[in-house]
Image: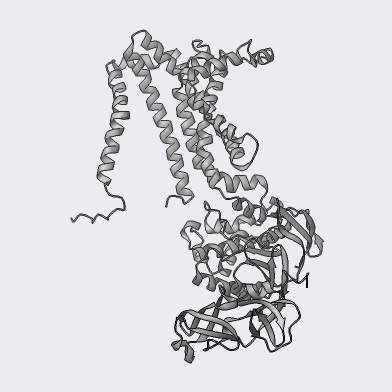
Amino acid sequence: MSIQVQNIHKAFGDFIALDNLTLDFPSGELVALLGPSGCGKTTLLRVIAGLEQADSGRVLLDGDDASDTHVRERQVGFVFQHYALFRHMTVFDNVAFGLRMKPRGIRPSEAEIKRKVHELLQLVQLDWLADRFPAQLSGGQRQRIALARALAVEPRVLLLDEPFGALDAKVRKELRRWLRRLHDELHITSIFVTHDQEEALEVADRVVLMNHGRVEQIGSPAEVYQQPATPFVYGFLGAANRFEGQSSAGGIAIGKATLTTGQHVQHGEVIAFVRPHELDIVRQEFGHGIPARVSRVLTLGALTRVELEGRDDVAGQHFDVELPASHPLAGSLITGEPVRLQPRSVRVFANPETAGAA
Amino acid sequence: MTKAPTLPRVLPGFGLSLGFTLTYLSLVVLIPLAAVFIRASSLSLEAFWDAVTAPRVLASYQLSFGMALLAAAINTVFGLLLAWSLVRYRFPGKKLVDALVDLPFALPTAVAGIALTALYAGNGWLGQYLEPLGIKVAFGPLGVLVALVFIGLPFVVRTVQPVLEDLETELEEAATSLGAHRWQTFRHVILPVLQPALMTGFALAFARAVGEYGSVIFIAGNIPMVSEITPLMIISKLEQYDYAGATAIASVMLVASFLLLLAINGLQAWQARRNGRSE
């Protein structure tokens, strides 16, 4: 089932959580709402679920205006970050809850409920825990039960609010893969909220990047990563070194230094981003490139990360460079050594703070 | 047979603290209570039986325990309501209302009794409207109930409030998103979580009401066979220097209260087991 939100606006006092937002979620996709905390992603999810009322705008479910429909009638499955399992009920009763709450006329028989609950527990591979209480389960198991509970009422859409946020890194990775497989089986339109870019890129069909209550970019994981539309997206997806300067012949002028871009750059104030693995270290104090000084060399498995401090015109800025551990520089760089930085690939954006004036 | 190895405990001094607890409990609670039974045992069995089953005394049991249970039940319902309002809503003067709840704890009970009597007497602020309707509050059994409700109110509010504060609203949201109506959410999600606290509050309010004397004697009217509470029967025996008779009635009251509280605790434990909270 498709979901559309149209001109949704929501403010909490002076804080604008959702700023006139319009979005389309096609049927059957698994979409990630990605952004830093406070960007409005959870609020958007809650507005779609009907747990929060927007100040203005509409939510369309399958083309029908659902703005005035109560959560109960929206048929959305909602999964909470902290599971929200009913702790006085067994796992079985938790999953059966939605079925048992149905009006008498359409409530399935106890035998039917039993069959269905076990089917769902098998789907989440936890059938053997049916008689346990939530307190006896691990975090990952609880979240899978919460998902089974949400699926029991056959929701038209599945909404997950930071579903893996409370889990440790290893379990989180497993559950991610598991959620992806589950979605491939069920094909239920799903939206999940996350602030973890890796999670969004790994699991989702489509990523919606949000910031300050607005959408920054929508696209497939590859699109948003490789062709970030705004400086925010570039900076948010993966590590990046940021340079601010003035466009000039052959690159970007930052004080007296020049960041060579090897491409034509739009005029005026610009922001340039370079990924840590696309920045080269040149072992000379003077010459081309951005002046910097090595402050720390860290070897992390197959990668060596070099942390640098800017010198001269870029003093006070921090840069990161990643090298393969086998690179000749990896072992020989000395802390405090003055170097120059030269990018192999640069992504340039007009500086939004000064773009209006230019 | 070998002794099972004792596990090292996080906090030392288990033996010491248990010993202290038992000594303290004995000195403060058990020995005075035992004195009641020893005093009562100075009566012959027949005299004891006569003292505790006199018609006036029997009527007072009925009034005392009946009204205490009723008052505790009323306090459970309205205490929950009050706790809910205090936890879930923000309104002007909330702090003030919160503080007012404890007032029945602090007020000398005689003051409460006099105030309530003045209010509900035939010429009182409320009594003057109620009496023409045939509702006689002061100087009757209904007055006893009003006084007991008054003094028992804080117990339920104060036991339920912290539990309610810990109850995540997410649980209610989860229930609604699964299609539960308001009543279903309350009945199946909120109430089971609150139940232990409600029962504790009920037991405390009941225990307090059974033993209440000060506020009740002013408003009850103390009509023999109609509105005499058991503590009053004990006091009146004492005033006639019939210490043995007084302690006889007191011991019956003690045993009955103890059994009722034990039953409530048992019910609570049974429910905790059923709900898997025991571990």
Left or right: A2 in relation to B143: right
Q: Residue at x 44, y 23 (%)?
A: B211
Residue lying farthest top? B240
Residue lying farthest bottom? A328
Name the one closer to the observer, B140 or A80. A80
Q: Is residue A297 visible?
A: yes
Give residue A10's position: percent from left, percent from top: 74, 56
Instruction: Please determine whether, in this image, residue B93 is positioned above or below residue A290.
Output: above
The quadrant holding residue A219 is bottom right
Give residue A61's position: percent from left, percent from top: 77, 63
Q: Residue at x 61, y 72 (%)?
A: A197
Name the one closer to the observer, A92 or A252. A252
Left or right: B144 in relation to A265: left
The structure's colour scheme is one colour
Give residue A101's position: percent from left, percent from top: 65, 52
Q: Quadrant of the C terminus of chain A?
A: bottom right
Q: Residue at x 29, y 18 (%)?
A: B39
Q: Quadrant of the N terminus of chain A?
A: bottom right
Q: Residue at x 50, y 83 (%)?
A: A338
The quadrant holding residue A112 is bottom right
Q: Is residue A133 visible?
A: no
Instruction: Please determine whether, in this image, residue A151 is positioned above or below residue A297.
Output: above
Left or right: B193 in relation to A5: left
Name the one closer to the observer, B42 or B243. B243
Instruction: Please determine whether, in this image, residue B159 is positioned above or below residue B11.
Output: above
Give residue A140's position: percent from left, percent from top: 52, 66
Name the one closer to the observer, B274 or B26. B26
Instruction: Please determine whether, in this image, residue A322 is positioned above or below residue B43.
Output: below
